[in-house]
Amino acid sequence: MRIVIEVDGVAAIARLHTDGAPAACRRLVEALPIATALRHSRWSGETTYAHLPSLVDQGLQRDSSAVPAERPASIMCAATVHYGPARGNLGLPYGQAQSRAIGGRNTWGIHVATVEGDLGPYLRALGSVRRRGSVPLAIRVHEGS
Amino acid sequence: VSIRIRLSVDGAEATAELDVARSPDAARGFSAVLPLDGELLTSAWSGHGCELLLPEALRAVAGTGATSIDVPVGTLALAPATEGPLLVIPYGTMKTHAATGPVAATLLARFVNGQGAFLARIERTFEEGALAVRIVVEP
């Protein structure tokens, strides 16, 4: 299954990791389509994030260690989608990043999707958020998925 | 010797006094690169504050004599970072980090005038993006 991530008009397609992280992916898909503001992280490095109260799921955070690929991770890789259910955050990193909360405390999330294809325009769009401020983010199911 | 600097951004101006007694090398090094024009960006690793990338000449003094990663509101500090030395200006909780982990910051100055309006303006970089800044030695 694939999703379309549109950052201020720049679209990219990402593959959901429904095998490795089924519960988290299901939770994300249920929340689609998403239209919200994307901001640059102040604590986590080279990443942007969107805060979505509808994605808060404390149970998912606790249960996720049952499935290896769904185990919470702090490190975020560029061009992935990092879902932090404890606070309902979606991290969209473009470089070196680590999931952290106010004060610098490490937090955790689940790698739910990876962007495919030409990453250049997408990563540049994410990287520009720090200079541009908040930009529109839209996520929807990819037609034909 | 007291050295005061004036920081100007769109719509706000503030004055700060360099802490020459506590951080003599940083204070003198910083005043030597003024006047300075640059771009304030929202912090990426260190929290609720802004950062300004400084000339490479300040790399040697950023972090010297520093013992803490906490930078209190009302102060300005120099932090070493991968991309170069940074001037950090908190408007909320700020703990200086680089991509490699925590890095202690050198206390550089304290606001003496215009702090409230200045910090309120730079906080908007989080929503509105980068902000041009000019820093000069106060005549």
Image (tube, rainbow, N blue to C red):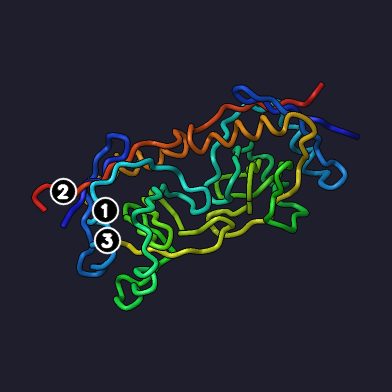
* Residue named by callout 2: A142
The x, y position of residue B37, in whole percent, is 62, 26
Front position in the image: B117 or A132: B117
Q: How many marks?
A: 3
Front position in the image: A128 or A106: A106
Query: Subunit of mark 3?
Result: A
* Residue named by callout 3: A27
Determine if marks 2 and 3 fall on one subunit. Answer: yes
Label 3 residue SS: helix
Mark 2 residue type: His
* Residue named by callout 1: A31
The x, y position of residue A24, in whole percent, is 29, 64
Determine if marks 1 and 3 fall on one subunit. Answer: yes
Q: Residue at x 69, y 33 (%)?
A: B116
The x, y position of residue B128, in whole percent, is 48, 32
User: In the picture provided, is A93 more to the left or to the right than B80?
Assistant: left
Query: Subunit of mark 1?
Result: A
Q: Residue at x 34, y 54 (%)?
A: A54
Query: Subunit of mark 2?
Result: A
